[in-house]
Image (spheres, rainbow, N blue to C red):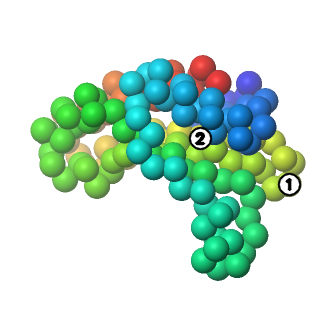
Amino acid sequence: MDSENLVYGIKRKVSYSFEEAVAKTTACLKSEGFAVLTEINVKQILKEKLDQDFSNYVILGAYNPHLSLDILKANLDTGLLLPCNVVVYESPETGEVFVTVVDPTAMMRITGQEDVIAFSLEIQSILFRALEQL
């Protein structure tokens, strides 16, 4: 599959339908120790709240309690940057399906704390490994 590095994450084109991609992404995250705490169906919310049509787009809130514990111990305010977002969407132009994963290191750099950044590198590695399973 095609992958693209973003400044704040990594994006991968997958060969699944949108629904399959959401299910497989959730399963890959779980296999790496992440729970999906939230699933925000952006298409549904925009239709219900604004009567606007939008392409298939879901934001998954991935959380690994074991990994986040060290970051929270180092700085309780880092909870503002949790959970890690994973987005699954269907391009309205091409119908291609993409999965994007936030780079937790890019997020944690704003704290300026080297120990927090170091912890986030482990989380980054595991999240990106989950994406590679797709």
In this rendered view, identify the residue nearer to me: 58 or 14. 58
In the image, residue 3 sits, relative to residue 82, either above or below, namely above
Q: Relative to the observer, which residue lies in front, 22 or 87? A: 22
Q: Earlier in the sequence, mark 2 or mark 1?
A: 1
Q: Residue at x 67, y 62 (%)?
A: 43
Which quarter of the rendering shows the N terminus? top right
Residue 54 in the image: above or below residue 20: below
Q: Which residue appears farthest toward the right when viewing the image?
A: 94
Residue 59, percent from left and from top: 55, 50
Q: Specify the amino acid type for callout 1.
A: Glu
Label 2 crowd bin: few (<14), some (14–19), many (20+), radius 10 Å: many
Q: Secondary structure at mark 2?
A: strand
In the image, residue 26 lies at what x, y percent?
Answer: 54, 34
Q: Could you tell me residue 126's position as x and y percent? A: 43, 23
Q: Secondary structure at mark 1?
A: loop
Position of residue 117 in the picture relative to residue 52 (left or right): left
Q: Which residue is mark 1?
A: 93
- The answer to whether residue 38 shows anywhere in this view is yes
The residue drawn where x is 65% and y is 64% is 44
Which label was assigned to residue 100?
Answer: 2
Residue 4 visible (yes or no): no
